[in-house]
Image (spheres, rainbow, N blue to C red):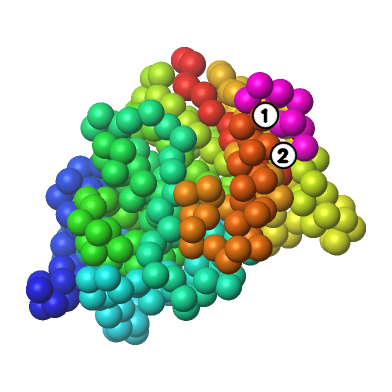
Amino acid sequence: MASTLADATTDPTVDKALLELLVCPRDHQVLEQRKHHLLCPSGHRYPIVEGIPILLLSEIPQTHVEGTRSLQVGASCESMPASLPSPLPGEIDPFVQDIIGATNGMLYVRLVGKLTDYPIPYLRLPQGNGKRFLEIGCNWGRWCVAAARMGYRPVGIDPSLKGIRAARQVARQLGIEVHYVVGDGRHLPFAAGTFDQVFSYSVLQHLSKENARLTLQEVARALHSAGGFLVQMPNCFGIRCLYHQARRGFHEGRDFDVRYWTPRELASTFRATFGSARVFVDGFFSLNAQISDVNLLPWKYRTVVYASETLRKISVVFPPLTYVADSLYIEGTVKR
């Protein structure tokens, strides 16, 4: 079994089902594999590392340092880092053990190196019934796993080659079929109308508002007519969000800092892009904590999560609570 996993990891061939979904992120032309690269008819060339396409645009500034590192690895296959060891059944992937505090939020920091199970969250969407699902900024793939378990056909995209490698290993370990790509939400490598549902959590908040809007425009293009979106964003009026804004003097964020949006700003931005938008509560006191993870957390943090979940339920019947929630969802469908 170990040799089979190793062969699957080092194989340079892009999965045929994934290749059929991909287009050049520059001009949206069809891509063809030529050994360790994907090529479009215009001559744009993209490296493949261990069967993972790196579809980033090298001529533009990356939104995350991992995007730059992915490009560096793709540009020099001879300097590729060794493949990560595949976790044994029952073990947690080493990358996930190390990154859990960064991908799931500050309440999870004490779980770094101590995870006993993967924190796979509850996805607030109806059953997938075979619909094609795209996650923007998937990292190690927790939401893609959740989507697959709900009957979607997930594709995850992230600028981090390290994250995508781990995501593939986690999916194999859990017996989940997911496709992953190294790419940029501002330049999605998919044809127009490819997806039925697009999802993003704790990602667009780290982009400048200009880059977030560019990403939303690409999401609208990648969704088919009447396709749905569900995106998590921070609320500048949230109790915890106000605290963090005060700590930095209420200045606009830089680099990978969180950018805070008003509920009205979110609604108007998404409606301008998609034609519809509904803002509702994800949680309070944090931007990442999930009630589905509560048994993994220390007791003092469970209290925070339970309080958040209680307030979230109250917000359903008392919508004004939305204005002081820290984490918001925006959902809707494309209206063309």
Whether residue 196 is visible here, answered yes or no, is: yes
Under mark 1, the amino acid is: Ser
| Magenta region, residue range | 316-325
Q: Main secondary structure of the magenta part?
A: helix
Residue reaching furthest top? 336
User: With respect to residue 168, does 27 lie above or below?
Assistant: above
Disc 1 crowd, CA 10 A, few/some/many (<14, 14-19, 20+):
some
* Numbered disc 1: secondary structure: helix
Q: Can you give x and y, in whole percent of width and height, for residue 79 in the image?
A: 34, 84
Kindly identify which residue carries mark 1.
Answer: 315
User: With respect to residue 103, does 92 lie above or below?
Assistant: below
Under mark 2, the amino acid is: Ala
Quadrant for the N terminus, please: bottom left
* Numbered disc 2: secondary structure: loop
Q: Can you give x and y, in whole percent of width and height, for residue 306 in the image?
A: 62, 47
Task: Name the residue located 63 percent from the left edge and 60 percent from the top edge.
Answer: 301
In the drawing, does residue 177 fall left or right of residue 128? left
Instruction: Report if the CB atoms under discs 2 and 1 are less than 8 Å apart.
Output: yes
Task: Name the residue located 47 percent from the left edge and 15 percent from the top edge.
Answer: 336
**In front: label 2 or label 1:** 1
Task: Determine which of the numbered discs, if any, sits on residue 325 in the image.
Answer: 2
